[in-house]
Amino acid sequence: MDEQTGMNAARDAWLRWYWLWDALFAIVSVAIAVIIVTDGVGGPLRRWAAVGVLALMAAWYAGYGRPAITEEVSAGQDRGRIFAAGLVLLLMAAVALQGGASFALFAVCPLLFMSLALREAVAAVVLVNLLPVLAALVEDGTGGLLAVLGPGTVFTTAFGVMVGVWVHQIVSQSEQRADLIRELERSREEVGRLSREAGVAAERSRLAAEIHDTLAQGFTSLVTLVQAAESELDHDTDKARGHLALAARTARENLGEARALVAGLMPSALGTGSLDEAIIRQVERLAEETGVRCDHRFTGDLAELPTGLEVVLLRAVQEALTNVRRHSGARHVRVSLDVTEATVALRVTDDGRGFDPDPATEGFGLRGMRARAEQVGGRLAVHSGAGGTTLELEVPR
């Protein structure tokens, strides 16, 4: 919900209950008109003139005041001041004609607080509460003034001001709460937007890592096998055919990886067997492609590992063996996987030429491997030098 929607919702709630003020104004107006007509004080002309002024007040409220109050957001305070001024003048005329019209204060005072700012409304309410006193002063002089001015007038004036201030504070607090709710809604929308952007970025990073760990590595193997077959065509056709057959098998596996990636499934190597079988296939492929002596060792129960953890471990093995194939020039590679009740430890060791293990100089493959390890709460360590390279990945179960 945006700010404009929140403002519209608050305004709708205000309008939904505004009919109560309409009912109050109508009841008070009709009751005062009946009192004036049946009171018998003053001549009939003045009584009916006072009723006519009350009718004008009702028309002024219905035609101008009510829209000024309910449309304050777009109309501003000027219309409220004009309505309040007209309302006070009409009330003064009604009270001057008939003192009983002062009972209209029950309906007028709330409208003044709804039309004006707080200080303006307080001044206006004090003024209209003194109208009966001023009317008595004009008609009867100081004798009538003493009869009207007393504790009752002071009490009604003070009571009207206090109730108006109290209602104004309640309305002000409600507006502040509405502003706070709108701010919270904006904050929630911003958090949602940032979360969606973070999710998109994470998914892009995941897809980039998947493509690097599957398709790119598969294409690297294909290029290596085709080059090896080309070099053997003129000397050893059987060996060249072997390289091409292995290239065809690698291409089919890479196609399976691509389909699994598009479908958002687990790695195809895991879809056709267990984790240890998938690792063994990776190790045997490296031995067939490069002639490197490879061995492997598994301890513990691999069958109980969750699929997400299996994916991380398999991708780490694939990346490590790809680096051996492309860069190390190793003659011996060993893969070991140890499963305990608390952790799973993967270790890939080769006797190649090594490289600079500084994380600042790592390629995308190792960075992706570290990111995968961190996603499952694991830790990746790479030790490399002239005697070879050791990759250690430890993840909690």
Image (spheres, rainbow, N blue to C red):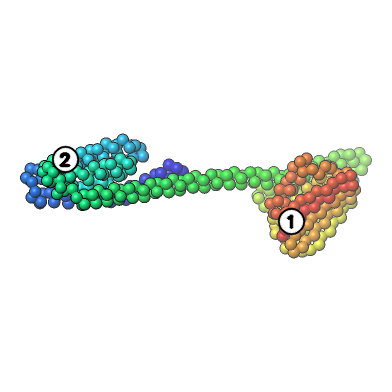
Q: Nearer the viewer, residue 73 or 268?
A: 73
Q: Residue at x 73, y 46 (%)?
A: 368
Q: Which residue is mark 2?
A: 93
Query: Where residue 273 appears, x then y in whole percent?
Result: 75, 58
Q: Nearer the viewer, residue 311 or 95?
A: 95
- The number of callouts visible is 2
Tell me the CA gap for discs 2 and 1: 88 Å
Q: Is residue 379 visible?
A: yes
Q: Is residue 270 visible?
A: no
Q: Residue at x 27, y 51 (%)?
A: 159
Q: Residue at x 55, y 44 (%)?
A: 193
| Quadrant hosting residue 91 | top left
Q: Residue at x 83, y 42 (%)?
A: 356
Amino acid under label 1?
Val
Instruction: Give the SS element for disc 2.
Output: helix
Instruction: Give the SS element for disc 1.
Output: strand
Q: Nearer the viewer, residue 152 or 223?
A: 152
Q: Nearer the viewer, mark 2 or mark 1?
A: 2
- Classify 10 Å Cα crowding around label 1: few (below 14), some (14-19), many (20 and above): many
Q: Which residue is mark 1?
A: 395
